[in-house]
Image (tube, helix red, strand yellow):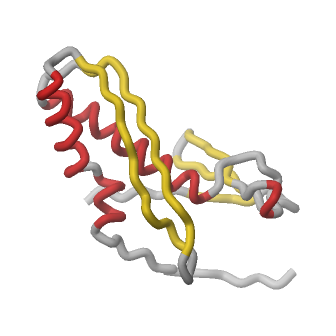
Amino acid sequence: MVQTVVHLRTVRGASAAVGYSGAHTVIIDRSEKAGGLGIGFSGGELLFLAIGGCYVNDLYRESAKRNIEVESVQASVEGDWGGEPVRAQNVSFSVHVEAKTTREEISDLIKHTDEVAEIPNSLRLGTKVSLSKFEAVSV
């Protein structure tokens, strides 16, 4: 089993955080309206980007297995936030794929990728998330 580890560290005096894994970084923040600096993606936006990003990456992986040359992919992910506790609801995504093959083969590739994409499947099948450790430091 392959393990993925990411880290986050807040910017001192702000709720904005830098998320990193290896040499890659991203800024995570709340909107200014919600009390943040508005300098990065929110957690919800990152969740939706993870869904779309995983699907796009996996589409290229699956197209290579089928010897299909993909020219371009466009994806959009949308959803609502609600409930108690608040969570993503009514999440859906759309995709536009241009490839050097028939429309039927592209359609089959799109549907197949939807069945095997790891992040969408993690959410669909209810991946357990747990708080494994914490430290509380009074300053």
Residue 44 is situated, as x and y percent measured from the top left of the image, at: 57, 58
Does 130 sit above or below residue 21? Answer: below
Camera-nearest residue between 114 and 65: 114
Camera-nearest residue between 119 and 88: 88
Quarter of the rendering containing residue 133: bottom right
Viewport quadrant of the C terminus: bottom right
Give the left or right position of residue 128, taking residue 6 as reference: left
* Residue depicted at x 82% and y 63%: 35
Residue 46 is situated, as x and y percent measured from the top left of the image, at: 55, 52
* Residue depicted at x 25% and y 47%: 114
Give the left or right position of residue 62, taking residue 138 as reference: left
* Residue depicted at x 40% and y 53%: 92
Camera-nearest residue between 100 and 11: 100
Give the left or right position of residue 95, taking residue 19 as reference: left
Residue 54 is situated, as x and y percent measured from the top left of the image, at: 37, 45
Does 34 sit above or below residue 78? Answer: below
Quarter of the rendering containing residue 134: bottom right
Count the marks: 0
Give the left or right position of residue 40, taking residue 65 as reference: right
Viewport quadrant of the N terminus: bottom left
Camera-nearest residue between 10 and 82: 82
* Residue depicted at x 13% and y 28%: 105
Residue 132 is situated, as x and y percent measured from the top left of the image, at: 49, 80
